[in-house]
Image (cartoon, rainbow, N blue to C red):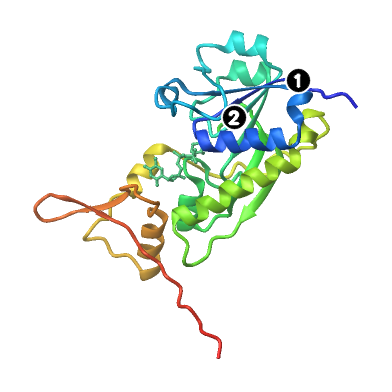
Amino acid sequence: MNIYYKKILIIGDNISFIEKIANILENKHLNQYADFSYACSPEIFKELPSNPKIEFYHIDVNKNVKTLVNKFDLIISAHCKQIFPAELVTKVKCINIHPGFNPYNRGWYPHVFSIINKFPTGATIHEMDQKVDHGSIIIQRQVEIFSYDTSDTVYKRILDTELDIFSEVIEKILYNEYHTCTLQEEGNINKKKDFQKIRQIELEKVYSGREIIDLLRALTHGDYQNAYFIDDENNKIFIRLTLEPEEVVKE
Ligand code: 0FX
């Protein structure tokens, strides 16, 4: 059987994630059958480590539609922060690897909002259309959120799941032998500004214990200064939560 897509661009702004994708392709020896190029957004390119494991180009997808259409027959977005223009997604097959369980909490930081609103989270690989995180689903897998999870512990699980489902489906994609299912509902979408809005804890607001713990653990992610309150002297005070399940010692 002949491979269908042979000129492939993988574009994303999380360099270590792209390197893991490249690793999967290499381990499967897929570079023998197709040409893979790797790119990131121009602002990420400026900060690339001096010796990245793979060669990266930088591309502004809005300014280079013609070149992309001529050069590639498949574009895979792997956490690319640029919004693909309509002309690009209609003229070339574009597929998105997304750290969320579409159509729930499409858009910005899906799992952060899932910790708060309890909608499912996970990983989805889908065809791109003109709406954000919206096209037909090729494969998706839900990721569980436990009571002791913070944003970063869920996110790590999601990254692993994205790589697992990518590894499972990539040959089917390259041979154009995959099936899709269309979204049964539009779901909901969160934008960058929605994340900004939830960061401030209002000192006079009344939250239930569950609400405040969920909000703070959703905003706890490594060293990021996400959640904060403004104290009486007008200082911004950042907050991070530590969650520790009791260790049960078996007698
Ligand atoms: O690449 P990504 O994991 O995902 C984001 C969007 O959520 C996703 O829908 C889109 N397809 C993709 C292109 O961009 O985001 P990130 O690498 O900037 O951040 C990873 C996680 O880190 C995020 O889920 C939450 C956490 N984070 C990140 C920043 C920059 C914070 O908690 N605070 C922050 O300020």
Q: CA distance from mark 1 to mark 2?
A: 16 Å
Q: Is residue 231 above or below residue 131?
A: below
Say which residue appears at 60% left-offset and 50% top-offset.
122
Task: Find ligand 1 in the image and state its quadrant.
Answer: top left
Mark closer to the chain start, 1 or 2: 1
Q: Secondary structure at mark 1?
A: loop
At a point 68% along the width and 40% down the height, the residue shown is: 166
Question: Mark 1 highlights which residue?
Answer: 6
Q: Is residue 233 visible in the rendered structure shown here?
A: yes
On the rendered structure, is 234 left or right of 59?
left
Residue 136 in view of the camera: no
Counting from the top left corner in percent of width and height, residue 191 is at: 44, 38
Mark 1 residue's CB less than 8 Å from ligand 1: no
In the rendered image, which residue does mark 2 sit on?
77
The answer to whether the beta carbon of the residue marked 2 is less than 8 Å from any atom of ligand 1 is: yes
Residue 196 at what x, y percent from top left?
A: 34, 42
The number of numbered badges drawn on the structure is 2
Quadrant occupied by the N terminus:
top right
Crowding around mark 2 (Cα neighbors within 10 Å: few <14, some 14 to 19, many 20+) is many
Q: Which amino acid is tagged 1? A: Lys
User: Is 242 in front, or is 85?
Assistant: 242
Task: Please give the label number shown on residue 215.
Answer: none
Instruction: Say what amino acid the circle numbered 2 marks.
Output: Ser
Q: Of all residues shown, which one is farthest toward the front? A: 51
Query: Looking at the image, which is closer to me, 69 or 243?
Result: 243
Task: Give the side of residue 152 with respect to residue 224, left or right.
Answer: right
Say which residue appears at 53% left-offset and 51% top-offset.
Answer: 156
Residue 38: image location, x then y, percent: 59, 24
Instruction: Tell me: 225 left or right of 161.
Output: left
Give the residue drawn at x 67%, y 50%. 141
